[in-house]
Amino acid sequence: MTAPFSIAIPGKPYEGASPDPYWFSTIAPRAADAALATDITCDLAIIGGGFTGLWSALKARERMPDARIVVLEGGRCGGEASGRNGGFCAPSISHGISNAMERYPREADRLIRLGVENVEALEADLERYEIDAEFQRAGKLNVAATPWQVQGLRSMAEGFAAHGLPSAFLEGDALRAKLDSPVYSAGVFDPTYALVNPSKLVEGLRAACLARGVEIHEGTRVTALKKTKTVLRLTTPGGMVTTARAIMATNAAEPLLKRFRTAIIPIFDYSLVTQPLSAAQLASIGWTGPHGIADSGNQFHYLRKTADNRILWAGYDAIYHKGSGRDAEMYHREESFDRLAAQFAQAFPSLADVRFDYAWGGIIDTSARITFFTGTALGGRLAYALGFTGQGVSATRFAAGAMLDQLEGKKTEASELSMHRRFPVPFPPEPLRSIAVRMAQKGLAHEDRTGQRPLMLRVLDRFGVGFDS
Ligand SMILES: Cc1cc2nc3c(=O)[nH]c(=O)nc-3n(C[C@H](O)[C@H](O)[C@H](O)COP(=O)(O)OP(=O)(O)OC[C@H]3O[C@@H](n4cnc5c(N)ncnc54)[C@H](O)[C@@H]3O)c2cc1C
């Protein structure tokens, strides 16, 4: 059996593509929020203006109507992962049902319920705050390219049924009515999944925060974080922030506190977006519905349509740069764009001539447990949420609530999950880190080719260590 994707590169159909995410082009250009230029004192300082930071600010405002809440964003709100993702809004906080069952068997039922409730509450929040993020319960089709992936999908459907969740196993005409590709032979449709436009979600959250008196400073990087007996002090180039409490929502950036530097690694993930397609082109691949799609390998693609009928085709490569590199030039990787373009042509031969208008990269904060974790540090004054590992569009909202509970010292269902109680298994220091990631990736690729999980990965599974994007 050969790998499902294995063909030659057809030129560079992304030549001249914008290196910025397509999503950036869908929001009105605006001036940056002013950088901090003086010393200030506040009740809650939030470091990072992505989904996690902005949900934290908005949810904090609901709890503390009179507090001074300040968001400190090093670049632009939504400039990193929150504006670079696929916009798949999972009804899950545990990176899926099977991950919940494997990693948290005793808590799985609760995690699965909380994930479903979180998306319902997210949808309600969008209505309440009048945020147009193109939220749509479009559903997600998971597709299989090999016999063992088909088997995996059957187990997935059983997992859904066991938890009373709707899904449909599709083959033949039923599959072709949702996606017609020579590569995929079966699918599981999950109708509860939603899609959003990530940049519109960021801008909507930002506007809702500003309208409620949250202060947002862009271009304001926090360079140091210190605790005194009574307060926290955050150093920025423009001034010192003295605050009673803080939230660290910095995702894949190098963590400000050393203790987190082995808990996550930065993994680059790449996306292409086609030119707008005609109804006939989309009909030629059977994709007339609004649903998103993902294939089932360890190295997987995720694909969805945009409001103007482009296809976002992303994933597969998950690139770790030695020394946990996060340099600006790493956001553009021709090798990954080439591979994505070739695989797109193989999956959709009728669209082989289509060009790509956007080609960009983003960083995923990968934890060895694949699920995020929250907690407090610095005497309970700082809360953090990290390790979303490619599934943070909805989970960040949940994490914001958990962090606020933890800062208030409240024991709630959200704050007390065992997911938070233990730190994920740390990644080793370099050079071992690079070697370990390379070996894990080789093992995952081998499994994709053969359906056989190598011994090394099975051993890591036993210790709850995974590698995903
Ligand atoms: C390519 C890609 C595709 C993805 N696809 C999906 C998907 O389809 N569905 C899904 O659920 N998840 C997806 N994810 C994951 C999801 O995007 C993230 O989990 C989520 O956006 C994390 O939000 P965040 O606010 O924690 O992080 P970010 O959006 O990265 O925000 C962190 C912010 O902190 C700022 N910052 C960092 N350090 C400092 C500092 N010292 N001082 C001040 N500011 C600082 C950064 O500038 C950044 O804006 C994807 C991620 C990527 C990269």
Image (tube, grey):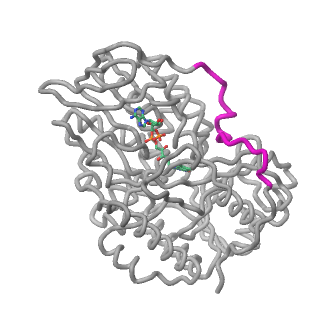
Q: Which of the 4 image quadrants contains residue 407?
A: top left
Is residue 149 magenta-colored?
A: no
Residue 150 point in image, percent of width and height: 59, 77
The answer, for residue 114, to whether it is visible in the render is: yes
Decide: is 281 above or below 159. above
Residue 365 point in image, percent of width and height: 43, 51
Q: In the figure, is residue 74 to the left or right of 259?
A: right
Please report the bounds of the magenta region as a residue range.
13-31
Could you tell me what secondary structure mostly forms the magenta stretch?
loop
Is residue 30 magenta-colored?
A: yes
Q: In the figure, is residue 457 to the left or right of 317?
A: left
Q: Quadrant of the N terminus?
A: bottom right
Decide: is 204 above or below 239. below
Residue 401 point in image, percent of width and height: 34, 38
Decide: is 314 above or below 2. above
Instruction: Please tell me which residue is depicted at 60% across the width and 63% down the height of the picture.
Output: 316
Q: Which of the 4 image quadrants contains residue 409?
A: top left
Residue 343 point in image, percent of width and height: 72, 66
| Residue found at the very far front of the displayed protein | 431
Q: In the figure, is residue 6 to the left or right of 121?
A: right
Instruction: Please tell me which residue is depicted at 21% across the width and 32% down the height of the picture.
Output: 381
Instruction: Please tell me which residue is depicted at 12% across the width and 27% down the height of the picture.
Output: 229
Instruction: Please tell me which residue is depicted at 57% across the width and 50% down the height of the picture.
Output: 330
